[in-house]
Image (spheres, rainbow, N blue to C red):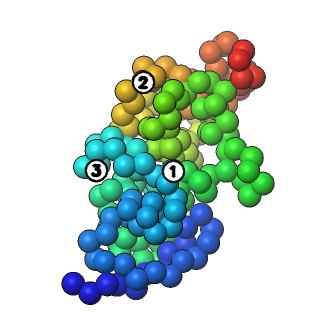
Amino acid sequence: MTDVDIRVRINGATRHDRVPPRLTLADYLRERCGLTGTHLGCEHGVCGACTVLFDGEAVRACLIFAVQADGAELTTIEGLAGADGELSSVQAAFRDQHGLQCGFCTPGFIVSATAFLRENPSPSDDEIREAISGNLCRCTGYQGIVRAVRAAAGGPDSSGEPGTVPASGA
């Protein structure tokens, strides 16, 4: 098989590359682009650790070939923070609500939650649980993750106050 030329926009920057047809998007992002926040867990689309935004939609990068991203706009976990390094509201909420433990699954959860909150900015806890059900975590028990998504949405946090996110350590 011959390599294929692709042009993608990743985290706001345009890239032109020549890639093998069977190179997964996850491997392309990690190996060719150095964006190692896109984690590889199961490599079968089950765990969600490799979730990225593909033209605004949350997708499993391990299930897509890099050539399929030709012409696409991609956003990885690295692209969610502001240009000045300020965390996105979802990233900050995960930090503040202790929505992570070992951190391996965290990028996929944050990217998934970002896409979900764009479509549903005021979700119920049941809707949050449904939205994150495609991502697996072996450490947290999910309660901090649900609180983080709720806080990022501006809903009541663990203190019961609407729209507030307590400072770290609170």
Estimate the spatial distance between the alpha carbons at disc 2 and disc 3, rounded to whole Å: 19 Å
Q: Nearer the viewer, residue 46 or 128?
A: 46
Name the residue beneath numbered marker 3: 43
Specify the farthest residue to the top. 159
Q: State the image coordinates of residue 52 (x, y, percent, origin top left).
A: 46, 54
Q: For mark 1, what is the residue? A: 37
Residue 56 in view (yes/no): no
Q: Say what amino acid the circle numbered 3 marks.
A: Glu
Q: Earlier in the sequence, mark 1 or mark 3?
A: 1
Asked if the residues shown at circle 2 and circle 1 are in contact, with their CB atoms under 8 angstroms apart, the answer is no
Report which quarter residue 134 is drawn in: top left
Judge whether 40 appears above or below 122 on screen.
below
Q: Can you give x and y, in whole percent of width and height, for residue 78 in the image?
A: 59, 54
Q: Which mark is residue 54?
A: none
Q: Say which label, 2 or 1, has the lower sequence index.
A: 1
Neighbour class for label 3 at 10 Å: few (<14), some, many (≥20)? some
Q: Residue at x 52, y 62 (%)?
A: 34
Q: Which residue is mark 2?
A: 139
Does residue 72 appear to the left or right of 161 in the view shown?
left
Question: What SS does tag 2 mark?
Answer: loop
User: Which residue occupies 51% across, 27% down?
Assistant: 101
In this rendering, position of residue 19 left or right of residue 12:
left
Left or right: 137 in relation to 45: right
Q: Residues within 10 Å of mark 1 (few under 14, many from 20)?
A: many
